Image (spheres, rainbow, N blue to C red):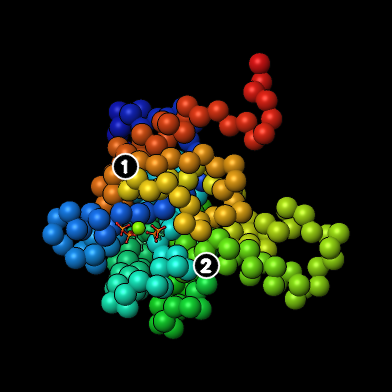
Amino acid sequence: MASEELTQTKLATVPRHVAIIMDGNGRWAKARGLNRIAGHRAGTENLRTIIRASIKFGIKYLTLFAFSTENWSRPKAEVTGLMHILSDVIDRDVQRLHQEGARLVHIGHLDGLPKALQDKVSHAIDLTKENRSITIVLAFNYGGRDEIIYAIKRMLADQVAPEDVDEALVSQYLFTGDIPDPDLVIRTSGEFRTSNFLTWQSVYSEWYFPQVYWPDFDEEELRKALEEYGRRDRRFGGLKES
Ligand code: IPE
Ligand code: IPE
Ligand code: MG
């Protein structure tokens, strides 16, 4: 990277963990007279841009909400299309991400996916597990409530004593395990709700809701989000230091 470019990308505060609800693919497509799958394909192209930009800005964890536990209720053709898109992304991008030092992890239930896709995701996770330049957390077949229920079930199965249950222990039992809580959660497309995303983890995240649909959320939009984050005053229930 040219040093001039590096200076331009310098930000006062860079959140360690940015999580994105990539919303608005369908409306983006509709506005162009295209079908919804074309919107999802455009959204996937954009993913490459945002991963590259995140590495450049120095973000260490990037969580991407790609498919929720509620998205199974969409028409079968759309669900199948989304599975194919994930499969194509892995085929096309994992080698390059590996070379760039990205580690891929998954949150949610892989076992709900077609077996061939499960194997593909598992292989990508295994291939990239030693990488440390950025951790890309793929939330696919993920739901925050589902995650909490699953954690409770496993704690009960492990016969955890009630007096041992605290925030640290519950956090360990979530899919996110050792991943730090998100500092910044972005939801594109002008929708103002969490839609079951990182329910436990986002209690003290800063939230940011740009109007643009996900395929139009480019590097400049990410920079704006990071600049806004830099202006926020995070108090965590305490008082601002004087
Ligand atoms: C986000 O775009 C992608 C997924 C939820 C899989 P949408 O498909 O929700 O697009 P809109 O919200 O209908 O525009
Ligand atoms: C949230 O978007 C899930 C993802 C972006 C993967 P949705 O489009 O599914 O959420 P709702 O239905 O508008 O709340
Ligand atoms: Mg949506």
Badge 1 or badge 2: first in the primary sequence: 2
Q: Nearer the viewer, residue 206 or 111?
A: 206
Q: Residue at x 64, y 35 (%)?
A: 236
Q: Nearer the viewer, mark 1 or mark 2?
A: 1
x, y (%) of residue 25? 28, 57
Q: Is residue 146 shown above or below 120?
A: above
Q: Residue at x 15, y 62 (%)?
A: 34
Q: Residue at x 32, y 78 (%)?
A: 76
Quarter of the picture holding the N terminus: top left
Indicate if the residue with disc 2 has its beta carbon within 8 Å of ligand 2: no
The tag on residue 185 is: none
Image-quadrant location for residue 177: bottom right
Q: Nearer the viewer, residue 40 or 124?
A: 40
Q: Is residue 140 left or right of residue 155?
A: left
Mark 2 lies on residue: 108
Dot 2: few (<14), some (14–19), or many (≥20) neighbours within 10 Å? many
Badge 2 amino acid: Gly
Image-quadrant location for residue 218: top left
Q: Is residue 167 shown above or below 155?
A: above
Residue 238 appears in the rendering: yes
x, y (%) of residue 42? 24, 58
Q: Secondary structure at mark 2?
A: loop
Badge 1 amino acid: Gln
Q: Is residue 28 left or right of residue 137?
A: left
Quarter of the picture holding the C terminus: top right
Q: Residue at x 57, y 67 (%)?
A: 146
Mark 1 lies on residue: 211
Residue lying farthest to the left in this orientation: 33
